[in-house]
Image: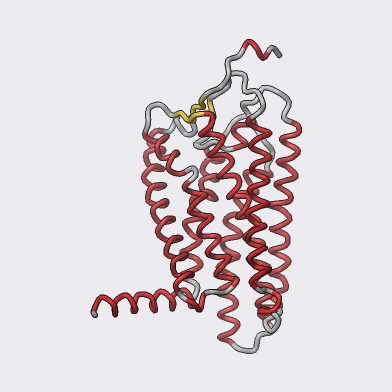
Amino acid sequence: MQMGNYSAVNEFFLIGLSQYPELQLFLFVLCLIMYAIILLGNSLLIVICILDSHLHTPMYFFLGNLSFLDICYTSSFIPPMLVVFVSERKSISFIGCALQMVVSLGLGSTECVLLAVMAYDRYVAICNPLRYPIIMNKVLYVHMAAWSWIVGCLNSLVQTVLTMVLPFCGNNVIDHLTCEILALLKLICSEITINVLIMTVASIVLLVIPLLLIFISYVFILSSILRINSTEGRKKAFSTCSAHLTVVILFYGSALFMYMKPKSKDTKASDEIIGLSYGVVTPMLNPIIYSLRNKEVKEAVKKILSKQLHLLRM
């Protein structure tokens, strides 16, 4: 193919769901409300984890990381997507598209690893409660969180660079709402075997393997919970683990559907809606699930509010 016959791509046009203008308007309002909830809910959870000394534990350290990650992740694509919904010229620059892809893919990959790390933390806490403070010491849990970020960001950097250096041959119309790597690969006019291979390996390493480890952890967790004599103890363990498991099913279920299903040349509207489910819905539900179902978080909120009210009365 003669590459010289094509002009370089300087910008992309995002036409996802453009054939459904009423749906776009509905999604604009819905995503705006959900984004506000994401910012408020996750920010509050971070503040609570910092202010309450009783929450300075590995579990809440990871939860704080997850909340910060969700704020950054959604901020990388929701505001530009909202602009696309209401603007006539639905475009994004080449550099802007690359930045959006590297940030969103990196943070999404990090969340995959972090959720597996959180499952291991719950496994140690419930199956080895006496050794938990020794095993999950500060050095270990800080390193586990750091490596989650490093692995996710390296995966994103490699995949983004290998995608954006390939020729688009003038193809700059993305049938998607964001600069998502699967949508970009459909525009490339050269061989993408290496890209597909790396993406498949990354999907197995960052999606399938963590999910298997999570379910293996929960098999041991469930057996340990059933052996707890205290009814209150069983209830607390079930509450904490069911919250984490709910988030895992929502996030991994939609992500696996997107990245492990057979690829087609055309993007379906259902694919974009499912993409929104793990990109927007899961980050919104995380603080709600972890706070409403967590007695320690609710008690910390009450304590902080009572302190603030006391200060206002003085």
How many badges with numbers are in the image?
0
Placement of the N terminus among the 4 image quadrants = top right
Residue 61, located in which quarter of the rendered image? bottom right
Q: Nearer the viewer, residue 8 or 127?
A: 8
Image coordinates of residue 122 in percent, x first then y, are 64, 72
**23 over 191 or under it: above or below:** below
Identify the residue at image location x=51%, y=60%.
67
Kindly give the residue lying farthest to the left in the view shown.
313
Residue 136, located in which quarter of the rendered image? bottom right
Identify the residue at image location x=36%, y=45%.
29
Identify the residue at image location x=59%, y=84%.
233
**227 over 5 or under it: above or below:** below
- Colour mapping used in the image: secondary structure
Identify the residue at image location x=75%, y=34%.
194
Image coordinates of residue 218 in percent, x first then y, are 68, 69
Residue 188, located in which quarter of the rendered image? top right
Kindly give the residue lying farthest to the bottom in the view shown.
229
Residue 248 visible, this angle: yes
**79 over 41 or under it: above or below:** above
Placement of the C terminus among the 4 image quadrants = bottom left
- Answer with left or right where residue 96 lies relative to residue 126: left
Residue 252 visible, this angle: no
Q: Nearer the viewer, residue 55 or 25?
A: 55
Image coordinates of residue 155 in percent, x first then y, are 68, 45
Image coordinates of residue 176 in percent, x first then y, are 53, 34
